[in-house]
Image: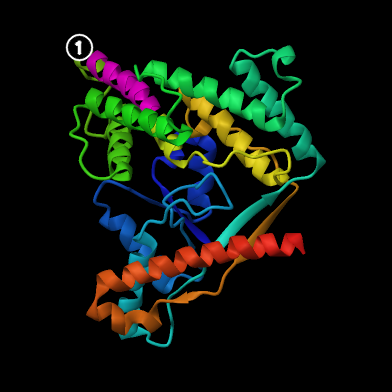
Amino acid sequence: MVFVYGYYVVRYGGWVARFVMPNIGAMPVYHTKVDSKGMARIYKAIADGPYPLAIAPEGQVSYTADTVPRLEPGVVRIGFHVASQLEEKNPDVPVEILPLSVHCRFGSWGKATVELLLKRIERLSGFNRREVKKLSFTDRLLKCREYILEAAEERYNIRIDTSLSFEKRLENVRTAALETAERMLNLKGEGDFFIRQHIVRQSCWDRIFLPDVYDMKNMPQVQRSTLDLGAGEAWYISRHQELADLCWYFPKQIPTDDTTLHNKIEYVQNLHDLASRAMGGAFANRVSIFPRKVIIHTAPSINLTARLPLYKKDKKTVIAKTLTDLENAFLDNINEMSRTEQG
């Protein structure tokens, strides 16, 4: 397969990403800028390339394998666009979406490592072993989660109201974090949450990584220092955006002692990530426990070429219907995985 990734991945991914991504044929794309060249590469790869194209329909990692938090319509729109092109020059070749899910499973190493990671979260939260050793697994998570949430609320001057649900309080933090970033960048904050956060991220990157039109070597010192300050400010502003992003994806259901190991591990990884981002971290600081095995599960493919006649009559309705079918396919993957393991 060839992969599509957000262009900023090679920036926070360091030299490893900058070396690996181009050399495996991966193709970068912008989320908030017009990128006709990038889109042309993607269309050509689907229509003429020898390999399938791998693209995340949720726009990024979803942080949980057993839920479908959201799907973006870009995958479906790209597929129909290429199907329309191929209808004229190569009608016998269908364009299909193969719903593919990745599930990690863990053994004894994962069980030991998740306990170490939870202990790290407890240390970050200021709890000693005497305070938590008699608590259940769920109560330990609740204690840490509450501490991290209160710290974030205090940071944004949000009144702590324990009568509200955790989800509502986290939503308040998410809103405050994004609005803080927008205010510091002098942005209006128009559009839905994801458009707004992509604009914030793009604005920050544009201040940190300047275009080639700047002659940094011969630039007057005042201008150079001003740009350096802008880059430093953008780095701090992006910390608010990184927190807002994870707040949207943070899992709602807290695991119990009887929850399956992989779900426990997912939650603890996300809780550590929440603590990290509350302290100014980013996706690059995320800790991932190494799995014992990775299961790739597929649902039946969705033939977009067969839907072209309806697509030409009513694009909006057909895209929405196909997106619903794609979501149901992912849910079928999850349910099939559960049935297989229970059996």
* Element on which disc 1 rests: helix
Q: Residue furthest front?
A: 163
Q: In this view, does 326 lie to the left or right of 229?
A: right
Magenta span covers which residues? 225-240
Q: In this view, does 105 lie to the left or right of 67?
A: right
Q: Where is residue 63 in the image (x, y as percent from the top left)?
A: 53, 44
Quadrant in the picture for residue 336: bottom right
**Does any portion of residue 215 appear in the rendered image?**
no
**Does any portion of residue 105 appear in the rendered image?**
yes
Asked if the magenta segment contains residue 128, the reply would be: no
Q: Kindly identify the residue that appears in the image at 66 percent across and 61 percent down.
A: 337
Q: Specify how the rendered protein is coloured.
A: rainbow
Q: Is residue 179 left or right of residue 106?
A: left
Is residue 245 positioned above or below 88 on the image? above
Q: Nearer the viewer, residue 214 or 304?
A: 304
Q: Kindly identify the residue that appears in the image at 44 percent across and 27 percent down.
A: 163
Q: Nearer the viewer, residue 21 or 308?
A: 308
Quadrant in the picture for residue 100: bottom right
Asked if the magenta segment contains residue 239, the reply would be: yes
Question: Given the image, on which type of amino acid does mark 1 rest?
Answer: Val
Q: In this view, does 201 lie to the left or right of 15?
A: left
Is residue 183 positioned above or below 111 on the image? above
**The C terminus: image quadrant:** bottom right
Q: What residue is pinned by disc 1?
A: 222
Q: Kindly identify the residue that appears in the image at 43 percent across and 81 percent down.
A: 94
Q: Where is residue 150 in the image (x, y as percent from the top left)?
A: 47, 20
Q: Kindly identify the residue that appears in the image at 40 percent across and 73 percent down.
A: 47
